[in-house]
Amino acid sequence: MSQQKLSEELRTLLQTDAEALTIAQLVDRVGDRGFGLLLLVLSLPSALPVPAAGYSVPFGILLVVLAVQMLVGKTHPVFPKRLQRVTLSKSLAEKLLNGASWIFEKLEWIVRPRMKWVGQRIGLTLMGVLVMIMAILMMIPIPLTNSFPAMVIFLIGVGLTEEDGVFAILACFVGVFAVLLYGGLIWAMILYGPEVAETIKESIRSFLG
């Protein structure tokens, strides 16, 4: 069970006096707490409505690496030295802390340890498949947004961090919906051309006002 609230966990990971925080430092701070916190942090720049241009591809690669390790049964995340040097700027870390606060306010009273077996070998493998697909969707230039797949990874990370199997399962259902949604979008673009994505985008904007 997590010893801190989600917001406190995130603050512990992201606080730094330096100008940037490296992935190596993040992994060191995560320690033996597994994959959940790293999934959560690495998906945040794309999941939250904060300016974080340029992070989807490098962080997407990092998330693919994590997903592969989940698939093969690793118990602790490890990155190649080259990827360990990827950095998160101090200014972005502060934006993420502020931007994530409202999410944690909604989730912290819902999430609690239950059905912990979901985060064991078989469950971790299935979630690894979804994380890999979502990370790839984050990186490819699909018109609309990369926020949806990043949010799925974020929710899976919350479920794993808090050992909440029910929440993790619900996050996976959202992930399956995302796969179907993006699959349909890609198929429509193949059939009718890339302009169909722009039409869908405008329809969503009109619906949201």
Image: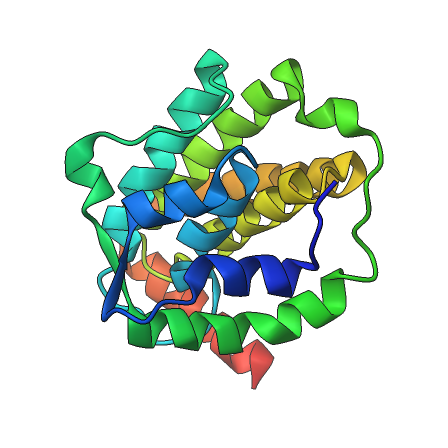
Task: Tell whether 48 sits left or right of 93.
Answer: right
Q: Quadrant of the C terminus?
A: bottom right
In depth, the one of 2 and 118 nearer the eye is 2
Q: Position of residue 176 (x, y in %)?
A: 60, 36
**59 or 6: which is nearer to us?**
6
Q: Is residue 183 above or below residue 197?
A: above
Give x and y (percent) for residue 185. Answer: 43, 47
The percent position of residue 194, horizontal first and vertical second, equals: 27, 54
Question: Residue shown at 74%/68% (left/top)?
Answer: 106
Relative to 191, is 193 above or below?
Answer: below
Q: How many marks?
A: 0
Query: Which residue corresponds to the image point at 21% horizontal and 49% vertical from the top-left?
Result: 86
Give the position of the N terminus as an image quadrant.
Answer: top right
Residue drawn at x 51%, y 38% is: 179
Quick check: 122 above or below 169? above
Q: Percent from the top left, x then y, of residue 38?
A: 46, 44
In the depicted view, which residue is nearer to us: 66 or 25?
25
Kindly give the residue lying farthest to the front in the view shown: 17
Task: Indicate left or right for 62 with 180 as reference.
Answer: left
Check the image and report above or below for 28 versus 102. Answer: above
The residue depicted at 79 percent of the width and 51 percent of the height is 111
* Residue found farthest to the bottom: 209
Which quarter of the picture shows residue 79? top left
Camera sees residue 181: no
Q: Is any atom of residue 37 visible in this view?
A: yes
Image colouring: rainbow
Could you say which is closer to the camera, residue 28 or residue 39?
28
- Side of 4 relative to 59 (left or right): right
